[in-house]
Image: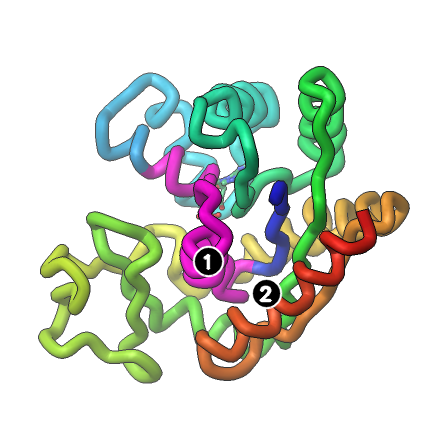
């Protein structure tokens, strides 16, 4: 399957993407993770991206699209992928369509995770992420790690992403409404969108998502 995941920051995209990708045996491709890996490796791309990310703004399309296409070109994505955090605006969505056209393939579905705005800010401001794996996410109130600042999964250090502070979250939400939400309409025109609520326990949201994706696959 070839799937795009959209939703506001704090909807649980990264968490759900990891489970869904595992269930569907497809690679989880997160442009945010790719940028963060570049930053921790000190690459030129990482240096270019960092200031935009820290402010909660989008990294320019040119670099983002090139990076996403490079990743999609890798062998493990030949038969399917789950894109998390890309595309994030209409220009990126058009670039992705052009890329898929060139390869003679198409998306099976766009999964839209819905969550109320007040919930988003609460979720993100208390979020602590594992340095080793951004799918290992904890929360200082809702999902406390067994030991403070230590990941239950792999012992990695938990930290607050620099773009998870309250001010930056508000900006990320604005950017989401302005830039990213319009791609939902763009994909609705292609009849690809399924919307589910991202509220409730993680496994329940995953179940909802799997069910919703089964329907998209039947349609195409
Ligand atoms: P995420 O991990 O998906 O929340 O992404 C973290 C940050 O990385 C975003 O706030 C952006 O600054 C940057 N980023 C990730 N994906 C994209 C994208 N498709 N276009 C532009 N910037 C992106």
Report the residue at 63% width, 38% height from top: 87
- Measure the alpha-carbon separation of dots 2 and 1: 9 Å
Compare marks 2 and 1 and give the one earlier in the sequence. Answer: 1
Q: Which mark, residue 165?
A: none
Q: Compared to 44, does 110 lie above or below?
A: below
Residue 84 showing in the rendered view? yes
Q: Residue at label 2? A: 210
Q: Compared to 133, does 142 lie above or below?
A: below
Q: Looking at the rendering, in which quadrant would you find the N terminus?
A: top right
Q: Which residues are magenta?
A: 9-36
Residue 167 showing in the rendered view? no
Marks 2 and 1 close (CB-CB < 8 Å)? yes
Where residue 77 appears, x then y in whole percent? 49, 31
Q: Is residue 153 magenta?
A: no
Q: Is residue 15 magenta?
A: yes
Report the residue at 32% width, 52% height from top: 134
Where residue 171 appears, x then y in whole percent? 56, 54
Q: Residue at label 1? A: 23
Residue extending furthest toward the right? 189
Give the number of marks.
2
Circle 1 SS class: helix
Where residue 206 appears, x then y in whole percent? 52, 69
Report the residue at 29% width, 20% height from top: 43
Q: Callout 1 environment at 10 Å: few (<14), some (14 to 19), or many (20+)?
A: few
Where residue 197 appears, x then y in whole percent? 64, 75
The one nearer the camera, 177 or 20, is 20
């Amino acid at each position: 399957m070839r799937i795009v995941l959209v939703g506001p920051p704090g909807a649980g995209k990264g968490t759900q993407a990891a489970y869904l990708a595992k269930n569907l045996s497809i690679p989880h491709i997160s442009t945010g993770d790719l940028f963060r890996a570049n930053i921790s490796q000190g690459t030129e791309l990482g240096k270019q991206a960092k200031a935009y990310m820290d402010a909660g703004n989008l990294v320019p399309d040119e670099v983002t699209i090139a990076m996403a296409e490079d990743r999609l070109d890798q062998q493990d994505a030949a038969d399917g992928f789950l894109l998390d955090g890309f595309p994030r605006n209409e220009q990126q969505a058009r670039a992705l369509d052009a890329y898929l056209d060139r390869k003679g393939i198409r998306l099976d579905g766009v999964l839209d995770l819905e969550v109320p705005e007040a919930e988003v800010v609460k979720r993100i401001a208390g979020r602590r992420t594992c340095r080793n794996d951004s799918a290992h996410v904890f929360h200082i109130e809702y999902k406390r790690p067994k030991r403070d600042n230590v990941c239950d999964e792999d012992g990695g250090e938990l930290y607050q992403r620099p773009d998870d502070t309250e001010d930056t979250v508000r900006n990320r939400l604005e950017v989401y409404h302005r830039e990213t939400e319009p791609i939902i309409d763009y994909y609705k025109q292609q009849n690809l969108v399924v919307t589910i609520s991202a509220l409730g326990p993680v496994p329940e949201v995953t179940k909802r998502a799997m069910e919703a994706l089964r329907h998209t696959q039947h349609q195409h």
